[in-house]
Image (tube, helix red, strand yellow):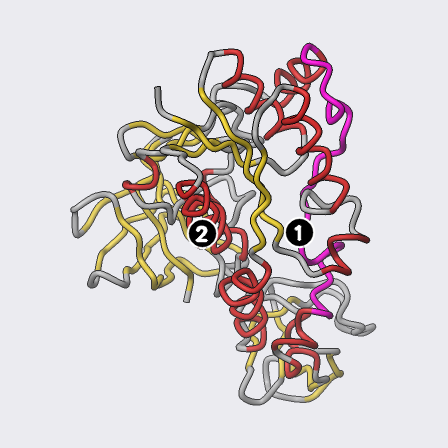
Amino acid sequence: MAKIAVALSGGVDSSVALMLLKEAGHDLIGVTMRHLNDECFDLWEGSCCSRAAVMSASRLCKKYGIKHYIFELEKEFEEKVLAPTALTYASGKTPNPCCDCNEEMKFGMMFEKAREKGAEMIATGHYALCNDGMLFSARDKKRDQSYFLYRLSSEVLRKTIFPLGELTKDEVRELAKKYYLESKDSKDSMEICFAPNKDFTKVFERFAPSALMPGDILDETGIIIGRHNGIGKITVGQRKGLGLRDYQDKYVIELNASENSIRVGNRPISKELSVSKLVMRAAKKKFRAVVKIRSQHKGSWAEIIIADEDTAKVIFDELQENVTPGQACVFYDGDLVLGGGVIQ
């Protein structure tokens, strides 16, 4: 029987995943990334990656005689996630660091570390499904995380298990009570682990100070109507928090990093977009699919035209609001994830 490394955050989802696999009789080890700096690790108790959460994971493994390994990956996390995230914001785009973290860290470096400890497969508490190298959305569509996992390669997916893929969140909570887990009543963490309350200030100060530089706010005609507090704090489609008393009905329609300015106007809508960093599991050059342009997007039908191995054009059947450069654009055929890319 293959040895499975269970990625543990200390939260209810990963803890239940461990218990389900243990109950099924698998040979398990627990693995956890220690990727935040000391200040964040000690203070952010609400984070899935805090000291309290990691210690909770360790106690769970100790209770059941499962070896638990904590991998020190702070420097790698800075290089692969923090710095690219800050620089992307500073360039006037809105990145999705969870996609990078899943590909580069959790299913990349952490899995490699787990293999050194004898693991042949990895399991996580993500709400998704995989089979024969293909990725599928979870049964619980409100909790589905396949959008954040679209970059995982078929090779990695063949060695991945998602024990919660067929469960709802309520069912997971009930299982946590059945197993008497200390995480059974823990709150769901919807925040980015290194940016509580979506505050990237410390990350910007360290990796991209220009993202915090004040600049001009322009209307559609180019007239200056106000000042912003840093391009890294703004995203396309934003309406609130701009400090524009006389333009409260206007939306951010453009971020100009070279001039450190933003432009506001009517709600941005578009029917086409282009993506780069293309990941595809289908060989077709042109096809139709349901496309999600953000994690909570309901998905819309579109035609996808592959330009080359790295880029594609997406033409929607209906106009889309607030298409945001830097966000993931993921293609679905029913529950099957066909691929995706980064909105340009």
Q: Is residue 28 left or right of residue 68?
A: left
Q: Residue furthest left?
A: 284
Q: Is residue 198 visible?
A: yes
Query: Residue 30, percent across and down?
Result: 55, 33
Q: Is residue 113 left or right of residue 339?
A: right
Disc 2 from disc 1: Cα separation = 18 Å
Q: Please say whether residue 199 is one of the residues in the magenta stretch.
A: yes
Name the residue nearer the viewer: 190 or 11.
Answer: 11
Residue under label 2 = 109
Relative to residue 135, is residue 141 drawn left or right? Answer: right
Q: Is residue 221 left or right of residue 80?
A: right
Magenta segment range?
178-202
Q: Position of residue 60 (x, y in %)?
A: 67, 26
Residue 268 can be seen in this image: no
Residue tagged 1:
193
Q: Residues within 10 Å of mark 1 (few under 14, many from 20)?
A: many
Question: Which quadrant of the view contains residue 271?
Answer: bottom left
Given the image, on which type of amino acid does mark 2 rest?
Met
